[in-house]
């Protein structure tokens, strides 16, 4: 029987373009990051059970600000701009990098990172950079290998093993995920609920890795 969704109350709070626009630095936040077109918005929508929560687009780089979703009082999911493909002026790219760098380095409420990678193209340069940021700060990290439905089961398992091996000893959990088929929803939700200190979070589910 499916478990109650601890993220179902998530709602759009604000989009942040400047540090002064950030909400008060209180409570708990999980940043959601990923390369453009890795399925980050689709993953957020599936996890929260709301297909319209985060805007999805066939155009890579659609998320162009830090977008805050409030799950409960002082409990936020923070959708970071997708990196890699956005066709924007270099000055805006530099602004994003500075804003994200400051947020990741200085935000006291930030407690975890959910890193979204297309299972067909994992551990690219910017994925590793985000991992370095998170591990340097001691954040809890979970990797979603998205679009798992694009590969046969044998290839899914192979990719999962390869990424787990590459991150062995780092403490980073890795799981398969498909927003389209609902694969991996429960362990990912459990991780987010635990990190956001939501009542009734299932710690066992949070630690489980989708096989």
Image (cartoon, grey):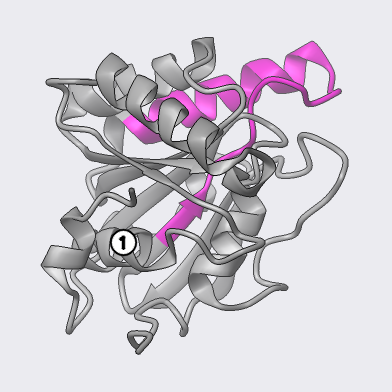
Which residue was labeled with disc 1?
187
Instruction: Judge from the rendering whether residue 185 lies leftward or rightward of residue 209; answer left or right.
Output: right
Tell me what residue is drawn at x 47 percent, y 21 percent: 127
The crowd level at tag 1 (other Cα within 10 Å; few <14, some 14-19, many 20+) is: many
Residue lying furthest front in this view? 154
Give me the residue at 50% from left, 46% from top: 20
Q: Position of residue 167 (x, y in %)?
A: 26, 20
* Residue 190 within the magenta-colored segment of the rendering: no
Q: Quadrant of residue 75?
A: bottom left
Total labels: the figure holds 1
Provide the residue span drawn in magenta. 77-104
Q: Position of residue 207 (x, y in %)?
A: 17, 54
Question: Of 166 and 8, which appears nearest the observer?
Answer: 166
119 with respect to 56 (left or right): left
**Residue 114 in which image quadrant:** top left
List x then y, in percent, for residue 130. Answer: 41, 23
Q: Position of residue 209 (x, y in %)?
A: 26, 49
Q: Residue at x 33, y 48 (%)?
A: 211
Q: Is residue 5 left or right of residue 64?
A: left
Q: Tag 1's secondary structure? A: helix
């Amino acid at each position: 029987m499916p478990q109650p969704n601890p993220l179902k109350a998530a709602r759009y709070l604000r989009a942040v373009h400047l540090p002064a626009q950030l909400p008060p630095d209180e409570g708990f936040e999980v940043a959601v990051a990923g390369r453009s077109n890795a399925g980050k918005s689709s993953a957020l929508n599936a996890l929260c059970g709301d297909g319209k929560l985060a805007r999805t687009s066939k155009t890579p780089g659609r998320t162009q600000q830090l977008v805050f979703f409030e799950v409960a009082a002082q409990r936020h999911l923070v959708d970071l701009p997708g990196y890699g493909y956005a066709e924007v002026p270099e000055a805006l790219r530099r602004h994003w990098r500075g804003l994200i760098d400051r947020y990741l380095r200085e935000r006291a409420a930030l407690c975890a990172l959910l890193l979204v990678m297309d299972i067909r193209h994992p551990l690219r340069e910017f994925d590793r950079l985000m991992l370095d940021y998170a591990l340097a700060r001691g954040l809890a990290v979970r990797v979603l290998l998205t679009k798992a439905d694009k590969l046969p089961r044998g290839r899914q398992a192979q990719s999962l093993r390869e990424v787990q091996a590459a991150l062995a000893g780092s403490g980073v959990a890795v799981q398969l995920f498909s927003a389209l088929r609902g694969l991996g929803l429960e362990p990912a939700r459990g991780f987010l609920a635990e990190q956001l200190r939501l009542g009734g979070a299932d710690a066992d589910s949070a630690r489980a890795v989708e096989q």
